[in-house]
Image: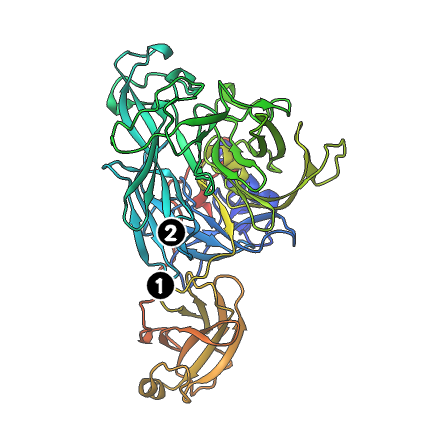
Amino acid sequence: MKLQFLFASVLPLLTQAAPSRQSNPLWYDQGLYGAYPWREYASFDLASPRVNVLTESTQCDPGYVFLEPRGRSVSTPGPMILDAEGNLVYMEKKWGEVMDFRPQTYMGETYLTFWSGTDDGTHGRGTYYMLNSSYDVVHTLTPANGLEGDLHEFELTSAGTALLTIYEVIPADLTSVGGPADGWIYDGLFQEIDVATGALLFQWRASSHYAVDESFAPLKSHGRSPDDAWDFFHINSVDKDPATGRYYVSARYTHTVTCISPFTSSNNNNTDGTDDGGSNSNSNSTNGTVVWRLGGARSSFADLSNGTASDFSWQHHVRWHPADNTLTIFDNGAYDNNDALATPHGHSRALVVRLDEENMTARLVAALVSPAGILAHSQGSVQRLENGNFFVGWGHSAAYTEFKVTEQQQSDDDEEGKELEQGAEADVEVLCDTHFGAAAFFGWGWVKSYRAFKSADWKGYPRTSPAVKVKRNRLHVSWNGATEVRAWRLMGATAAAAAADGKDEDDEEWVVLETVEKSGFEGLLHLAQAGREVEVVRVQALDGAGSVLGVSAVVDRSSGMTVSSSSSSDVGGPLPSPPDGCWFSFSFFFLADCLL
């Protein structure tokens, strides 16, 4: 009876509180708009997240945000681009769940890159894709030697190569961790391959350098068969220094960043005493020497920051920045929702760590913490932007934050809006903070993005045409992926004139009815002011100089029916249905997404 009363009391509140750009931030994060508040469109058949912008600043990078939303509450997962204000720019559902979606440069051209395939929960089996500015697939990559491409890393290098992560099941003696002598593990590998030819240039595997008892991952009942192999290493990122050729590998389950030489050493100066022999899969591949380790059971560095530079755990997305000898690391600080394995810091951190390889010391430059104190037990990323800011995606939690980091001597100042992690040297300021899902559900992972990136280095020119939809004497228009549109121009004509003259933008029979500046993903144009002689309409997409980028199909002014098709098929369609699976929890904040 009480449950029915609570449901009856809360439901009207939820249905009246439709989320908007000006919606209540507190209600949003408490889940009153659902776990994944979305925005629907008349001219486009998918729904995008309606973000909750909590902090804004003109100091934030103006670039696009690249996400791959997925989870229980995301009905159409896939690659997504938002503008800096959270408006949709591009999304596509045909790939399903993707990982590591971002723009990268290959041979002087910018491509959208990502992984797509089968996600097994902790790793994946799939293919790597590269899309050009028209969103055409121009390159597909898979690892060499018949191995399957893992979801964690697809990094392009300036040499025209790609770094890929791989998981391979191999036999292993697990007696040192309480398992069987004839056990099985997931070995962590990475390959560097030539993008143009697919040729294998380098391969490295963890089992040649790390003992299984260096893992912090619980064995549980794993490792007794190939079908239930134990993931002792969990490789999840690879980077390369173009000058030295060294590789930098993140391993979540050993809590380490490993620097690897591209060459083998006959003297084997490794401190770990493990074999530098060739790969089990390819005797011709090269398995480089471990130069040093940061973190884990046997760190090579003395920590000058009271341990905070090297006590990261369960981390993701390590990147090396040779210009100032720093590493950026997303320190998850948690294995799962089990507090017994969580970090003593109490939250996830995006770390900037400076290394002195001559004196073998590590110093924490900055620790970036979410204003919400997010503890994301999986996924996550940290990116150094061109303007010097740092952009952090919170992985398992549907949020991204941009920080300003100013290096200075540590002080006791505690100014409002700024935080200093103990032992850090830099002043850290939160500039922009955005949620694309309700904070009440962060721990559940119902809305998440493996990584998040920000970049202005993308221009999209789709082969489709602007999509239009007539509703109630108004015309809605959008063009999925078209980044250079600055205005929409509504044009009208008689049906006879349109049939005779086609769609040439210079046709004299067409008259300009209205021109509006593009604002957000979908534009709105009004048909009421058009004279009775106007029977059909179309929309031109204009760039900043007023040139026509594309023209929509010609549609009947009254019915909205297509009179003549555009050069490409429309991208419009039926509106999406709410996610399936309504349910009710003991807390009204955990109401199902489908209530709105």
Residue annotated with mark 2: 577
User: Residue 204: percent from the left, percent from the top?
Assistant: 35, 31
Q: For numbered disc 2, what is the local secondary structure?
A: loop
Q: Position of residue 133 (x, y in %)?
A: 39, 60
Identify which residue, 482 or 28, lies in the foreground. Answer: 482
Pointer 1 residue: 571
The mark found on residue 510 in the picture is: none
Q: Residues within 10 Å of mark 2 (few under 14, many from 20)?
A: few
Q: Residue at x 35, y 63 (%)?
A: 571
- How dense is the environment of label 1, judged by Cα within 10 Å: few (below 14), some, or many (20 and up)? some
Compute the Cα span from label 1 to label 2: 17 Å
Q: Mark 1 touching mark 2, by CB under 8 A? A: no
28 lies above or below 516: above
Taking the view exactly as shown, the residue that stands out farthest to the front is 267
| Image: 150 above or below 544 | above
Q: Amino acid at mark 2?
A: Ser
The structure residue drawn at horizontal position 35% and vertical position 62%, both measured from the top left corner, is 573
